[in-house]
């Protein structure tokens, strides 16, 4: 038997079903499903995606030849169901033609409405409805859409206006009116005539009057739209194969603008903002779908409850509400009851919140679309957990319903939705660390501290940040940098602090000396208010009200459920007891990375650190290190106590020493005074420390190898703190980690210092502390020789930030200069510093895990780069068999959920 290309849907027959999305597209499949459920849907048919593929591969004639008879039968079916004839001038059957791919591709393809009208049919429609204005308005809309979508009469360049809109404006001007609704029948007739003349002049062909020619033209235009530029780019970015094709939905038109017994609206089966289980929506009497969205008239609420809530917010008194803005429930109770029944039936059937479109034509309800509704993160969690409690879905479905990244919405302060409406966008940067912040601009970290001490809310604005800015960052409400990418210092530190940050906002010109910043034409001085949205990267002028996030009961329940299903452990990157406590609150079961260098910037510590850097010999360094020892010990004690028996992974000093010295003259002068040495000596040392490429320079274990006394001090601080914590009744699980190893000999050299120090401390105290000694795998070479390293190291922790930078061969701090363009061109699918490059860097991870386990079965392997908090990367690490991921505290819940989803998907595969 030959293949079927056309699938009918209607009262008397329906060929498709919801499960046939691949063949019918999302929209077509759901229209068919609604018909099967007995819900009133204007009759129609869907031309399958396979027909589109035939068109693309074999051309117009073959495709039309294959579908011709079926489409004609489909039209006959609609005619029979609707009691009208296609092309009958006295009472024409009018159609809509819409695309509908298997995956939703928002804004990609086009729609044609009112198909079937021509100079005769419009008169028939006017007579039949007794409403000539309506008929002519429908006709002019059709000619306009057809001229644009099918005949290709579009603006010539991006500066050009839509040629049809230009004509509408001209006619409105000559009439002296502002709104389309003020145009009368004669005006609309003039528009139609002018539109047709424009088409003839510009395209060289007449607007087709034959309804069949209109139909075939529209079907072909939808097929064509599958391969337009927008669609191609969207597909490439979203991994949608071009072989899928789009379906075409041809459906009888129904009108909500036929008078006071007609209406049109949209509705949600639950609240898309909060998730509350209440039916809600908006509608307009005597209107078309686009009028609801256009915002010219105030839409009314579907339910009485919604209407009363709306009136309260809009400060409309009950009497006025009932009189001027009654709900559909009050206005058309019978139709409302039908709508309510349909929404309940649809939500129960699809077991998810539905987004519905409906039209009431002269007292009759029609459903035009149902699909799973978009929702906020908060609504996502609440709907999933309530549907689980209501027995509508199972645990697995509930977990998979929540997009991990969207949990961000619940974890950070958010801008008040009402206040956002009038926000004044100044610039866009990278959404480096989520959250919302408003504050007064300051340009120096120490000034941020002073202002904050005076109780002011500040936004720290820097060209880029460095470890010197840490304290200023920690007191700021938000951080804005002009340079730097998603793993720049500012971004990483801000995420760790759970602080809002926008990085790499190239349009921002910072003048730290003059204490001003310029964005385009606008100037901001110290103390001016700005606001940042770290979730979108937007920068706004002025102050915008924020709301604190609440971790509701549903959120906790979702997390508990995730924990039951995941295999990966989730630890946190935390450098302070505060961070550690927050991490535990968010459910981390260990610290996967404590970056010890962050501890050296506070107060007197930086002085001792600089003393060590300035020292001429080992004795001098040891003297300075002796001052650091007690401070470092108390840091570790704080971490051990906060984690009480959970693993604490401490990494030895990693950054190049030049990060600890001032680079400007004033700073060097001050340091000279503090150190009681000449400014010349400081300048000389700073110059000696300068490197062409510090990220590939004297850093990581290379420091500990050059100066073993640093490693010795840090190891001693760890062991002494561990023993002290035990004395205080805490369980201690210490894991010591050597950074940036490339050969096992580097690891061995550092391990020898650490082990010898352990022996010494244990002998002094007469007690031992169990500990693990492992390494980061963050140079490509370490991954390549992981078997040799694994014979010596007791655990691996992948530093995927460095591993990415070294594998890709571009710097994490400079990539923002070209990566955005790369992403736009599709050279990379995503920022490899945000989501792991699975095929390249990921291969090194997989290989190192295998090699490590081949020599040390059961070796503990984790990841502590930024990727540990990225859901797609977490799924990859799950499949690669890692034991844990470690990420900033605020991403811990995201990683927990992502790990559960990975386990569920793994089990299903
Ligand atoms: C890494 O390189 O992935 C890592 C965790 O270390 P850092 O970001 O401190 O270089
Ligand atoms: Mg690193």
Image (cartoon, rainbow, N blue to C red):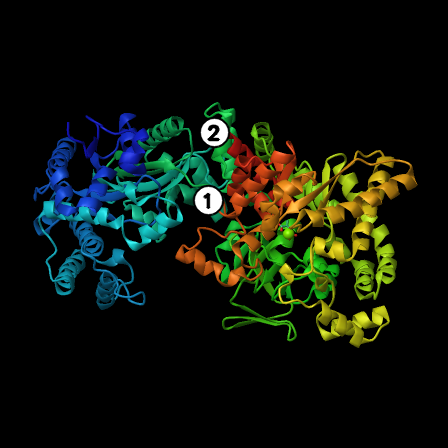
Rendered image: mark on residue 311? 1
- The local secondary structure at tag 2 comes to helix
User: Position of 725 compared to 441: left or right?
Assistant: right
Residue 31 visible in the picture: yes
Density class for disc 2 (Cα within 10 Å; few <14, some 14-19, many ≥20) is some
Report the mark closest to the observer, 1 or 2.
2
Cα gap from disc 1 to disc 2, whole angstroms? 37 Å
Horizontal and vertical percent for residue 674?
A: 84, 69
User: Position of 40 compared to 556: left or right?
Assistant: left
Q: Quadrant of the C terminus?
A: top left
User: Position of 69 compared to 56: left or right?
Assistant: left
In terms of sequence position, does the residue under pointer 1 or pointer 2 come before the other?
1
Question: Which of the pair 494/525 is nearer the observer?
Answer: 494
Horizontal and vertical percent for residue 789?
A: 66, 43
Name the residue carrying label 2.
397
Horizontal and vertical percent for residue 465?
A: 64, 62
User: Position of 437 compared to 375: left or right?
Assistant: right
């Amino acid at each position: 038997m030959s293949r079927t290309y056309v699938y009918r849907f209607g009262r008397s027959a329906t060929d498709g079903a919801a499960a046939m999305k691949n063949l019918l597209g999302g929209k077509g499949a759901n229209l068919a499903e609604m018909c099967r459920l007995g819900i009133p849907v204007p009759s129609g048919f869907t031309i399958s995606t396979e027909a589109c593929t035939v068109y693309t591969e074999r051309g117009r004639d073959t495709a039309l030849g294959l579908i011709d008879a079926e489409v004609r039968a489909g039209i006959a079916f609609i005619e029979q169901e609707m009691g009208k004839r296609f092309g009958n001038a006295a009472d024409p059957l009018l159609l809509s033609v819409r695309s509908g791919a298997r995956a939703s591709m928002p804004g990609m393809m086009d729609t044609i409405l009112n198909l079937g009208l021509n100079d005769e049919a419009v008169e028939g429609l006017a007579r039949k409805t007794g409403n000539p204005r309506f008929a002519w308005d429908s006709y002019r809309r059709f000619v306009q859409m057809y001229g644009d979508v099918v005949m290709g009469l579009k603006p010539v360049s991006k500066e050009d206006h839509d040629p049809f809109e230009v004509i509408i404006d001209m006619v409105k001007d000559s009439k002296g009116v502002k709104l389309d609704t003020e145009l009368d029948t004669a005006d609309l007739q003039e528009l139609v005539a002018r539109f047709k003349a424009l088409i003839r002049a510009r395209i060289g062909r007449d607007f087709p009057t034959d309804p069949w020619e209109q139909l075939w033209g529209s079907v072909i235009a939808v097929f064509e739209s599958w391969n337009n530029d927008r669609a191609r780019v969207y597909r490439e970015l979203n991994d949608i194969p071009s072989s899928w094709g789009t379906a075409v939905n041809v459906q009888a038109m129904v009108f909500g603008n036929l008078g006071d017994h007609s209406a049109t609206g949209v509705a949600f089966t639950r609240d898309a903002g909060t998730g509350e289980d209440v039916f809600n929506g908006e509608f307009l009497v005597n209107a078309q779908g686009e009028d609801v969205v256009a915002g010219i008239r105030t839409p009314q609420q579907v339910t009485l409850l919604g209407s009363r809530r709306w009136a309260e917010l809009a400060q409309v008194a009950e009497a006025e509400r009932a009189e001027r803005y009654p709900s559909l429930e009050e206005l058309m109770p019978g139709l409302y009851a039908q709508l309510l029944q349909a929404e309940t039936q649809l939500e129960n059937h699809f077991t998810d919140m539905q987004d519905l479109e409906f039209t009431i034509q002269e007292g009759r309800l029609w459903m035009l679309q149902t699909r799973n509704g978009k929702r906020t993160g908060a609504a996502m969690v609440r709907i999933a957990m309530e549907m689980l409690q209501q027995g509508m879905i199972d645990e697995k479905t509930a977990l998979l319903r929540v997009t991990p990244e969207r949990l961000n919405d619940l974890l950070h302060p958010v801008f008040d939705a009402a206040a956002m409406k009038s926000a004044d966008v100044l610039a866009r940067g990278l959404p480096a660390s989520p959250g919302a912040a408003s504050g007064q601009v300051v340009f120096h970290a120490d000034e941020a501290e002073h202002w904050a001490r005076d109780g002011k809310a500040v936004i720290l604005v820097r060209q880029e940040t460095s470890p010197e800015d840490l304290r200023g960052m920690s007191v700021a409400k938000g951080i804005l940098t002009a340079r730097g990418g998603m793993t720049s210092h500012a971004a990483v530190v801000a995420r760790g602090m759970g602080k809002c940050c926008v990085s790499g906002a190239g349009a921002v010109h910072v003048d730290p000396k003059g204490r001003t910043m310029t964005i385009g034409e606008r100037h901001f001085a110290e103390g001016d208010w700005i606001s940042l949205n770290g979730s979108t990267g937007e920068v706004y002028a002025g102050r915008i009200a924020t709301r604190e996030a609440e971790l509701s009961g549903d959120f906790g329940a979702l997390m508990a459920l995730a924990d039951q299903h995941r295999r990966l452990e989730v630890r946190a990157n935390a450098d302070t007891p505060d961070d550690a406590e927050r991490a535990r609150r968010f459910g981390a079961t260990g610290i996967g990375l404590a970056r010890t260098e962050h501890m050296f910037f506070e107060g007197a510590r930086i002085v001792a650190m600089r003393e060590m850097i300035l020292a001429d010999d080992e004795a001098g360094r040891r003297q300075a290190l002796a001052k650091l020892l007690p401070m470092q010990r108390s840091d570790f004690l704080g971490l051990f106590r906060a984690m009480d028996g959970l693993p604490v992974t401490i990494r030895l000093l990693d950054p190049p020493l030049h990060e600890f010295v001032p680079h400007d003259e004033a700073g060097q002068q001050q340091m000279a005074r503090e150190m009681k040495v000449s400014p010349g000596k400081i300048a000389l040392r700073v110059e000696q420390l300068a490197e062409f490429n510090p990220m590939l320079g004297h850093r990581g274990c290379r420091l500990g190898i050059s100066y073993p006394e640093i490693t010795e001090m840090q190891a001693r601080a760890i062991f002494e703190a561990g023993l002290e914590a035990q004395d205080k009744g805490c369980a201690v699980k210490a894991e010591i980690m050597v950074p940036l190893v490339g050969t096992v000999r580097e690891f061995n050299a550092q391990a020898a210092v650490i082990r010898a120090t352990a022996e010494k401390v244990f002998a002094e105290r007469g007690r031992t502390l169990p500990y693990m000694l492992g390494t980061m795998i963050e140079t490509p070479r370490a991954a390549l020789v992981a078997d040799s390293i694994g014979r010596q190291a007791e655990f691996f922790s992948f530093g995927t930030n460095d591993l990415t930078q070294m594998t890709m061969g571009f710097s994490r701090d400079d990539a923002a200069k070209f990566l955005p363009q790369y992403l736009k061109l599709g050279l990379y699918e995503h920022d490899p510093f945000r989501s792991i490059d699975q095929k390249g860097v990921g291969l090194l991870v997989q290989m190192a895990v295998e090699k490590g386990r081949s020599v040390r079965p059961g070796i503990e392997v984790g990841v502590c780069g930024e990727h540990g908090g990225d859901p797609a990367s977490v799924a990859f690490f799950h499949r690669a068999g890692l034991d844990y991921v470690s990420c900033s505290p605020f991403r811990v819940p995201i990683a927990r959920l992502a790990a559960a989803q990975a386990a569920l998907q793994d089990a299903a595969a």
